[in-house]
Image (cartoon, rainbow, N blue to C red):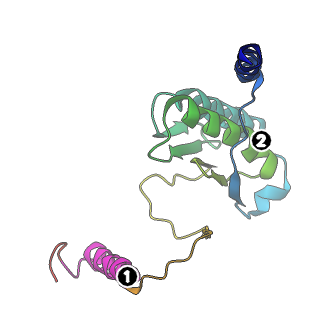
Amino acid sequence: MRSISFTFWLLLSFRALFTEAQVPNLLGSNCQNTSQQQQPLSSAYQTNLERILTWVSSDAYKGKVYNYRSIGITSSVYGLYDCRGDVVGYFCQFCVSNAAREAPRLCPNSVSAMVWYDYCILRYSNENFFGKVLTNPIWYVLGTKNIFNKTEIQKVGATCTTIGAFTSGTSELGTT
């Protein structure tokens, strides 16, 4: 009996040596619809895009959010990644690296792309989007559980209304 138990634990410990990391779950992507999308990217833009994607892939280990700019006269590329708040270090880097590898495949010949996974988001564009409020693209993530507590739903609605009023300048946060 003791040898069977030992053998079981020994085999179980060897299994850990051969496990593979799971690919992050792709939630969606958005490729900018422009007339330039039909033409191959210029070599200068392609070089800058590859540079940005390399930077975000390598730097994602250090922090959970960052933005980059690769300068060119007509071929500037702006890039950004963000990892979920509880995802740091190697896990953030793994997700962002996967996104950087998949974005050009999902959006071929596109000067602008956004891909989001369950743990991170990656975006690049030929237009400067840093510090700008964007309302598109819109995506919905549906959960598997229903909320039946009406009071909790009303609290969320009231909080959203308060935040909306505060950001539009019609109210002060914390007042009713």
Q: Name the image quarter holding the N terminus.
A: top right
Between the residue at mark 2 and the residue at mark 1, the CA separation in whole angstroms equals 47 Å
For label 2, the SS is: loop
Residue 89 visible? yes
**Dot 1 surroundings within 10 Å: few (below 14), some, or many (20 or more)?**
few
* Place of residue 125 in the rendered image (x, y in percent of width and height, measured from the top left): 62, 50
Observer-side mark, 2 or 1, equals: 1
* Place of residue 170 in the rendered image (x, y in percent of width and height, measured from the top left): 22, 82
The residue labelled by disc 1 is: 157
Q: Is residue 158 magenta?
A: yes
* Place of residue 147 in the rendered image (x, y in percent of width and height, measured from the top left): 50, 78
Toward which corner of the image does residue 43 lie, by quadrant?
top right
What residue lies at 75% left-to-right and 43% top-to-bottom? 102
The residue labelled by disc 2 is: 42
In magenta, the rendered stretch is: 151-171
Task: Identify the main secondary structure in magenta.
Answer: helix
**Dot 2 surroundings within 10 Å: few (below 14), some, or many (20 or more)?**
few
For label 1, the SS is: helix
- Label 1 amino acid? Gly
What residue lies at 60% left-to-right and 42% top-to-bottom? 76
Residue 108 visible? no
Query: Of the numbered discs in the image, which one, if any, rests on residue 133?
Result: none
Query: Answer yes or no: do the residues labelled 2 and 1 have beta carbons within 8 Å?
Result: no
In the depicted view, which residue is nearer to us: 89 or 113? 89
In the image, is 25 to the left or to the right of 168?
Answer: right
